[in-house]
Each structure stands twice: as C-alpha cells, then as structure tokens.
Amino acid sequence: MIIDTHIHWPVTMNSDHKSFLQILDRFNIDHVLLMGYEVLWKVGDVSECNDRLVEFCGKVPNRMSPLATVHLSEGERAVREARRCLEKLKVCGFKFHPWVQGESFFREEMYEICRMAGEHGVPIVFHDGTPPYSLPSQIGLLAEMFPGTLFTLGHGGILFYWQEALETTKRYNNIIITLCGQHPWAMQKICDQVAPDRILFGTDFVGPGAEEYIAYRKGLVEGLKLPSELREKIMSKNAQRIFKLS
Amino acid sequence: MTITIDGCCQLELGLNSQHDVLKLLERMDRLGIARCVAFPPDECFAWENESGNEAMITLMREHPDRIIPAVTVNPWRPNARQVLLRGLERGGLPAFSPGVQGLMLSDRKLDTLLQLLMDEKIHRPVYLHTGHHSHGAPSQLALLAGRFPQLNFIMGHSGATDYSTDVVPVCRMCPNIYIESSFARPPGFVVKLNQIGFDRGIFGSGYPFNSVEFEWSEMKRLLPVEHQTAVLGGNLTRLLKEHSA
C-alpha cells in the first residue's frame, strides 16, 4: 500500500477527480494527503479554495484526505478560517508553504493555529528546505514552542538542508520527516538514523503535466536499502497513524 | 562515433579512492557510459585544493579514456591563479562551487581566475555549481557569463532545486551557458531543454548521491530519441573539442 503525503492538485481550476484518480492508479498510489496548488500562490479566496478541496476529496474519501491552508497575513481571518477548517470541514491537517505564500510564520496567528492543531490532534505540514522562511530549524523552533503539536517537514530539507532537517527531527519528537525531494544518499541517511515511526513518503506532484515526477520520486525510494517493515511504515503505516486515516 | 559522458560524478580521496573509481567505472561499463567528469569532494573545493586536483589528475592518467578531471581552487587564496594554472596545464576542467568556497557566483574574485583561462588560451568550459540559495543563483551566473562572452559555462545542477524557474530566462539571455542535469531531476530537465534547445543539455548523474543507473535510465526514458546522443555526451564532447582546438 502506498500513501502519498505530499501531493497537490489545483482543485479550483480542475475539479475532474476522475482524471486525478487515473493518475493515482497509474502509479499504484492508494491514498493521498491532498493539498491545493493555486491557493498557495494566493489565487482566489482561501476559504473557497478550502471548500473546493474538501469537496474534491469528499468525492472519493477512501482515496483522498484534505490538508487545508490559510494565509497568515490575513490576520484574525486566518485564525477563523483555520478553526472553520478543523471544526466544520474536518480536515486532516494543514499545509503551509511560507516561501511561496511569502510569510514568516513567527507570528501570533501561527501560534494560535499551532495550539488549535494540537488540540484537534492534526499535523501541520510545512514546505521546508528554502530560506528565509522555510528552514527545518525554523520549524524546529515551532516544535519546541508547541510540543503537543505534530509538525511535518514536507521535504526533509530538499538538497541543501537535509542534514539540518535530520538534526531537527532528531532533536524534536514532534517533528516528522518526509522523503520527498532529497537525493537518495540523504534519504538513506534519514532512514538509517530517524525513528522508524517518524518518516513519511511524498512525491510533490503538482498537477497535470507533472506525472513523471511521481515515477521518478517513487523510483528513488524503491532504490533505498530498507528492511521491509520499515518500508511499509514509510510508504503507508506511519501516514495512516499520523493523519488518522481509517 | 559519439562518446557518452556522465557530466557529474564525485569521487573519494585516500584509501578508498581506487576502489571507488573502479566501482564507478564498472557501473559505467554496464550502462555503456564511456567517460565521466570526476569532481573531488567538497573539502577539496573549500580547502584542500591541491590534493583534490592531484587526485583527479592521477585518476585521469590511470584511466585516460574514462576520466575527465575537474580541478579547482578557492578564489580567496592569495596564490589561486598559480594553483589553478597547475591543474589546468595538466588537463583539468575548471570547476567552482561558490557556496562551498564562500563567495557569490557573480563575485569579481572569479574574474581573475577566468581571465587566467583567457590569458593562457585555455578555453575549456567552466563548470559552476548552482542552486545554493545565496551563492549559486543562475542569475548570478548570467552576470559572470556576461562578463566573459568568449568562455562557455556549465550551470552545474541547473539551479536545483529552488532556482528551477530561472534557468530558461538565463539561458535565453546567455548563449554561452549550458545546463547540467544532476539533482535537477530528469522530468524537469527535459522540459527546460525543450525550451532552450537540446544542444544546451549535459547529462550528469550526481554520483554517489544519486544512483548512476537510475538517473541514466530515467534520462533515457524521458529524452526524445533524436536528442539522446547530444545530451548523453555529444554536447559536452563538442564543448571540450571546440576548446582544445
């Protein structure tokens, strides 16, 4: 079984869930934690984007689970929207892409959202590996401030910050790391050194036309030297537990 | 006959170097890759320049038809010109890694060394690692390449990952920049070549951080058949030949 915990689809521009499912089927992906794409670039109203994302996932709930986002620069509205996503839309977690969204997360709105996420037991997934707003060590600071909230490094540092991601993950028990974007040398080190229950898999597929990235990223992980039990945890079991997928 | 080349492999120094290179050559043999550009490890870019250069040149002498040695010097060193010249005179391909060497890619300190190439009429392409956030932006390379229109530059790693968006505009502006694929992921690399021309692409595996076999097979799978010869060795061979003339 494969659960892709880092995958995008531009739900407000393309509501054709069947074509999305065809892509998942082509690459044997059983379930996804789905994030919007255009919403991260602040195209359209964020509440409407979250509604559409939840509606899209709701068409085939056994294959797709939504990760909502908010724009922190919207201040109190961001906090209200996050609360709505948790209480009304029942999302599985949040996704933040501080580099693309253009916002530092060291602000009160983020802290409030971290508290809420902790209370609801849902993780916050971050893009990481890009300065100045998305360093693994910066996300580590949030993890220290909110020990009851789970934070996911959505790229595990990518190419230049994977060692920082590894250090951050080792230091904070509430940090989860994703194999998604690093080279296989780094992935292997992560798998060898991080607790087996705290590693996820993702492809970072961004939508129509980028399908080959799924093949490539899957191929990288398939080439790692992993005991079968660990591979199973990375590819599905950890995600099931962390995102409470039934 | 066109030669197949892996444009980016990093080799070990010291006790393991012989084993490392033989292992790599064996894997290249299995894939039909004739040659590779051999880079010393990061510490040799940062500090141990001479030992790295020496090791790569020795490998070339031991495997003359297989190894293209990359040589470097940290531009901050007072005797940088002499160290680089020594490596170039023995057949090295000049390479720099500004993020590791502690300067911006557009820094004028590099000019002195590039001028050395011009003065000595050693017009080999210059390999520059890109992708480091502050020190390796393709746009910084465009500034450098604009100051040396007579030289050709290889954009190592094609700005991977976060400068992926800058590669096409930079290459359109600078005809003397070629892009190398390691860490840039074959699906995205091929899309860029579609926009700037397949005669500007150079395959690199990024060994040992990436698997040579997987990168090679993915690139072959995704490249249009008619452009495979160029990207998998032809373009780099042409650049090396042009400049040895």
Image: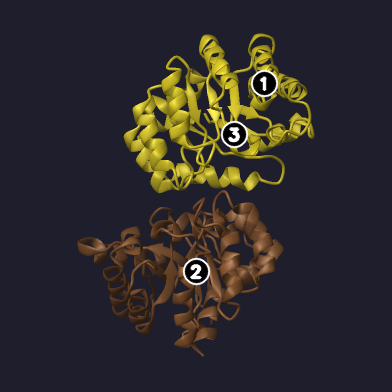
Chain colours: A yellow, B brown
- Seen in the picture, residue B116 relative to A144 is either above or below; the reply is below
Residue A226, can we see it? no
Under circle 2, the secondary element is: loop
User: What label sits on residue A75 in the rendered view?
Assistant: 1
Circle 3 sits on which residue?
Answer: A98
Quarter location, residue B8: bottom left
Q: Quadrant of residue A95?
A: top right
- Above or below — where is A177 with respect to B208? above
Chain containing the residue with disc 3: A
Q: Position of residue A13 (x, y in %)?
A: 79, 34
Q: Is residue A53 above or below residue B224?
A: above
Residue A165, x across and y down, in percent: 42, 36
Query: What is the chain identity of the residue bearing mark 2?
Result: B
Same subunit, tags 2 and 3:
no
- Mark 2 lies on residue: B108
Which of discs 2 and 3 lies nearer the camera? The answer is: 2
The type of residue carrying mark 2 is Arg
Measure the C-alpha gap from mark 1 to mark 3: 15 Å
